[in-house]
């Protein structure tokens, strides 16, 4: 989900040469030792396929006789016709983010110590990544189908954006390091839970209870996935407190950026910035949400109470535990500057080049 661009704490970290394979042999052994724990404590958070929802349950049934199918499509279009353009832009951005799943699975499947060596490895770490991907895959499929049937968006430009995004990849900052990767996914799953919950609320207010239910259902998946990843980091803090604490500090210093930050539609080079600004303005995902998630994780992992840390670990602890107030102060200043600036209109190809004020 979208991380507002104004949350910029230390951009210099992004200017450093990218690292890779930063895991020590000791930490690789720790991950190996946790395979049994993953089987018992993480894999049960997945849902069996036969008990899982599928996109077809939420959209018009194309197997029906044509007239019945057309009637269902008409009902969908009637529900979506009053949704504001700003809302559609954010929903499209959320969907595009979900559709770039091949990038995310590739990155997670290649993390050192938990990699999927064969593409079908029975290792519990690999089983989790593939199964997580399978559950996540339904999100983009469902939202894309719903938006397509609504007739309110330019699917050609949306599909081009997805094409560009998957081809561009993602600057994750993971360094092929699962400690960093699991910190990132903990934060990101919480962020998507918040954002999809907010899009559901706005859909209900806009007169589309079906779309509200869809967004709420997706948010439920994200919440379950958040539980898995935060549980993994919690375990790492138990078995390697300083190593895990330093990893948390590292990712927070780099800034948790939306996985789709390289989105591009062939026209707008600042598409991610503009989409994020709309999400911030309508309250789908805001800087306050970013700070709230950070505070939630600090509490969830009991970071303020960690003891026995190395000097580097204590430094990371102080940084992370004091970060949320700092973010809020920076945002207050950014808001003050924004109030003095004249709003500007930006065209979004996703909604047929209509202009929105940012």
Image: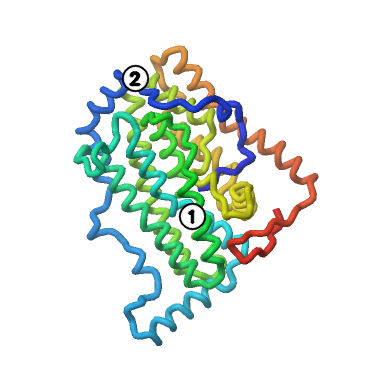
What secondary structure is found at the residue carrying circle 1?
A: helix
Q: How many marks?
A: 2
Extreme bottom residue here?
A: 67
- The x, y position of residue 182, in whole percent, is 38, 35
User: Which label belongs to residue 162?
Assistant: 1
Q: 159 or 151, which is in the foreground?
A: 159
- Confirm whether residue 333 shows in the render: yes
Earlier-in-chain disc, 1 versus 2: 2
- Contact, mark 1 vs mark 2 (Cβ under 8 Å): no
Q: 306 or 4, which is in the foreground?
A: 4
What secondary structure is found at the residue carrying circle 2?
A: loop
Numbered disc in front, either 1 or 2: 1
- The x, y position of residue 198, in whole percent, is 52, 55
> Callout 2 environment at 10 Å: few (<14), some (14 to 19), or many (20+)?
few
284 to 169, vertically: above or below: below
283 to 238, vertically: above or below: below
Q: Is residue 282 left or right of residue 31?
A: right
- The x, y position of residue 50, in whole percent, is 22, 60
Q: Is residue 316 left or right of residue 345?
A: left
Image quadrant of residue 113? top left
Q: Is residue 281 left or right of residue 317?
A: right
Q: Residue at x 43, y 66 (%)?
A: 145
Specify how the rendered protein is coloured: rainbow
Q: Residue at x 36, y 77 (%)?
A: 62
Distance of label 1 from label 2 (alpha carbons): 36 Å
43 to 243, vertically: above or below: below
* Disc 2 target residue: 24
Q: Residue at x 32, y 78 (%)?
A: 63
Q: 157 or 192, which is in the foreground?
A: 157
């Amino acid at each position: 989900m979208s991380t507002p661009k104004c949350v910029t704490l230390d951009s210099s970290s992004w200017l450093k040469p990218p690292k890779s394979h930063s895991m020590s042999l000791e930490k690789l052994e720790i991950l190996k030792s946790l395979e049994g724990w993953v089987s018992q404590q993480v894999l049960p958070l997945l849902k069996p396929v036969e008990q899982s929802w599928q996109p077809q349950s939420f959209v018009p049934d194309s197997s029906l006789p044509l007239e019945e199918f057309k009637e269902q499509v008409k009902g969908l279009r009637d529900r979506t016709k009053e949704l504001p353009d700003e809302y559609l832009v954010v929903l499209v951005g959320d969907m595009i983010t979900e559709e770039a799943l091949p990038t995310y699975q590739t990155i997670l499947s290649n993390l050192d110590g938990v990699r999927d060596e064969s593409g079908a490895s029975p290792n519990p770490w690999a089983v989790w990544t593939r199964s997580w991907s399978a559950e996540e895959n339904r999100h983009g499929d469902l939202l894309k189908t719903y938006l397509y049937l609504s007739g309110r968006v330019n699917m050609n430009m949306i599909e081009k954006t997805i094409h560009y995004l998957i081809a561009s990849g993602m600057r994750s900052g993971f360094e092929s390091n699962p400690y960093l990767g699991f910190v990132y996914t903990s934060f990101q799953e919480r962020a998507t839970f918040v954002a999809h919950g907010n899009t559901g609320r706005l859909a209900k207010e806009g007169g589309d209870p079906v779309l509200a239910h869809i967004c709420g259902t997706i948010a439920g998946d994200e919440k379950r996935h958040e539980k898995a990843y935060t549980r993994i980091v919690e375990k790492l803090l138990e078995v390697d407190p300083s190593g895990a604490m330093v990893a948390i500090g590292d990712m927070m210093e780099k800034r948790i950026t939306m996985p789709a930050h390289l989105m591009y539609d062939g026209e707008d080079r600042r598409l991610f910035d503009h989409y994020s600004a709309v999400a911030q303005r309508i309250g789908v995902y805001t800087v306050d949400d970013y700070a709230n998630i950070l505070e939630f994780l600090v509490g969830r992992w009991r970071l303020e109470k960690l003891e026995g840390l190395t000097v580097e670990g204590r430094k990371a602890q102080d940084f992370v535990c004091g970060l949320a107030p700092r973010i809020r102060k920076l945002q207050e200043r950014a808001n003050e500057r924004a109030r003095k600036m004249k709003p500007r209109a930006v065209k979004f190809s996703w909604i047929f080049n209509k202009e929105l004020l940012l």
